[in-house]
Image (cartoon, rainbow, N blue to C red):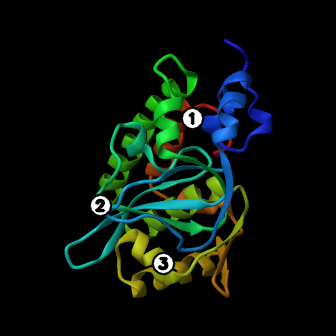
Amino acid sequence: MSQSFSTSIKNRLLASLPREEYERLQPYLEPVFLDFKRELYQPNVPLDFVYFPLEGVFSLLSLSSEGELIEVATVGNEGMVGLPVFLGVRQIPGMAMCQVPGNALRMRAEDLQTQVSRDSSLYDVLHRYTQALFNFISQSALCNRLHLIEQRCCRWLLLTRDRVDTDQFPLTHEFLSQMLGVRRAGVSEVASRLQNAGFISYRYGKITILDRAGLEATSCECYELIKAEFERLIGGNNMN
């Protein structure tokens, strides 16, 4: 198998492919920019595209019968939005939404299904990514049940920072509270404590991470466990 060319592609799944396989898929990959709150999928509506993020972060959301949205996982440049298509499913009860704007490569769902053969490298890496995302969702469920809001908030901020590869990104208290499944007042209180500790700065809807080590020390162990599983199964070093 030819050596991958990770230095030239920002998405880690695509970067892991042999050059000839990426070049074969390239005509099916369309560059798109996805802005804040852009809905990629809606409940029980056929999925027309899959997305390979180059920048930005995307939330996978579950919807309650009362219409409340809860985040179950996030996807950045380590993964793909639209994994159900790879698994043979074209519609799901959940949603996908852009939480941090950025560029991505999108592929038509039918092209993914026809181009990813069982003997391809992308078929193999998407299987490993499926396991990594399953581990992420499982660990997040445990974290949301057992750990403090402050610890969960630090985990979320660190994972988001790793995906965007910059210390500053847009974020509102309202959106973070929705993602963590807690009241906005609780998130505002935690954000104020983190800011007073000098770990972050928050102004005009933007978060700036000032002390990564402080966030890591305050976060629960879930951050390191999730990061380690992605590195073990996907490889690469983009999640710093």
Residue visible at 52% across and 39% down in the picture: 111
Cα distance between the residues tagged 1 and 2:
32 Å
Residue 146 visible? The answer is: yes
Q: Amino acid at mark 3?
A: Phe
Residue visible at 44% across and 30% down in the picture: 127
Q: Amino acid at mark 1?
A: Glu
Residue visible at 35% across and 48% down in the picture: 90
Residue visible at 68% across and 34% down in the picture: 15
In the image shown, does 217 or 92 lie closer to the viewer? 92
Relative side of 77 to 141, left or right: right
In the image shown, does 53 or 144 lie closer to the viewer? 53
Mark 3 vs mark 2: which is more N-terminal?
A: 2
Residue 180: give x, y in percent of width and height.
40, 69
Mark 3 vs mark 1: which is more N-terminal?
A: 3
Pointer 1: what residue? 231
Front label number (3 vs 2): 2
Pointer 3: what residue? 175
Q: Is residue 67 above or below residue 87?
A: below
The numbered dot on residue 115 is: none
